């Protein structure tokens, strides 16, 4: 019962959360969790150029493990952002591509990545000063 009061109080404060009902708010958080994941952003951004094989995605996304790439692709496919096409060839060939829904998210993902690059130095400097690794005047 206390949780409902907390949510009611949140809605009383001006801002985007005040506009959402309980079901919408839960779903919005779920989707933001998916699309805000670093691997999701990088997979969607990598698929901008068109269909890619699994190995091309793994090579094009530095630091991603096979497990994380597989899990990310499965989540994106489940939500309809990516399609998986398996070709009956020897050796087997599988390609991933953005759906229309995935393409509609692409510009936002690329803008987020560009913002990260643009502000990388500033954020890194602030972190360093906050953590005491860089003198305050630097």
Image (spheres, rainbow, N blue to C red):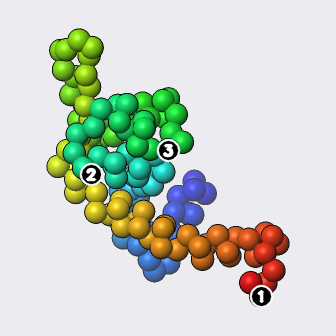
Observer-nearest of 108 and 48: 48
The disc label shown at residue 48, or none: 2
Question: Can you say whether 64 is above or below 28 in the image?
Answer: above
For marks 2 and 3, give the CA distance: 16 Å
Q: Earlier in the sequence, mark 1 or mark 3?
A: 3
The disc label shown at residue 62, or none: 3
Q: Residues within 10 Å of mark 2 (few under 14, many from 20)?
A: some
- The residue tagged with tag 3: helix, strand or loop? loop
Contact (Cβ within 8 Å) of mark 2 with mark 1: no
Q: Residue at x 48, y 67 (%)?
A: 117
- The residue tagged with tag 2: helix, strand or loop? helix
Q: Along the horizontal axis of the image, is 1 left or right of 80?
A: right
Q: Residue at x 35, y 36 (%)?
A: 56
Observer-nearest of 53 and 13: 53
Q: Quadrant of the C terminus?
A: bottom right
Can I make out residue 12 in this image? no
Q: Residues within 10 Å of mark 3 (few under 14, many from 20)?
A: few
The disc label shown at residue 137, or none: 1
Question: Can you say whether 18 is above or below 98 in the image?
Answer: below
Q: Along the horizontal axis of the image, is 55 left or right of 95?
A: right
- The residue tagged with tag 1: helix, strand or loop? loop
Q: Residue at x 41, y 50 (%)?
A: 42
Q: Earlier in the sequence, mark 2 or mark 3?
A: 2
Q: Earlier in the sequence, mark 2 or mark 1?
A: 2
């Amino acid at each position: 019962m206390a949780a409902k009061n907390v949510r009611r109080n949140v809605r009383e404060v001006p801002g985007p959360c005040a506009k959402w009902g309980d079901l919408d708010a839960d779903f919005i958080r779920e989707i933001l969790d998916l699309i805000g994941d670093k691997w999701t952003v990088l997979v969607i951004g990598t698929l901008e150029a068109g269909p890619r094989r699994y190995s091309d995605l793994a090579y094009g996304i530095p630091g991603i493990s096979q497990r994380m790439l597989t899990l990310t692709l499965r989540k994106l496919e489940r939500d309809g952002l990516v399609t998986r096409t398996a070709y009956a060839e020897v050796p087997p060939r599988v390609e991933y591509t953005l759906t229309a829904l995935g393409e509609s998210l692409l510009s936002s993902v690329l803008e987020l990545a560009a913002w990260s690059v643009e502000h990388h130095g500033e954020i890194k400097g602030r972190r360093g000063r906050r953590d005491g690794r860089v003198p305050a005047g630097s």
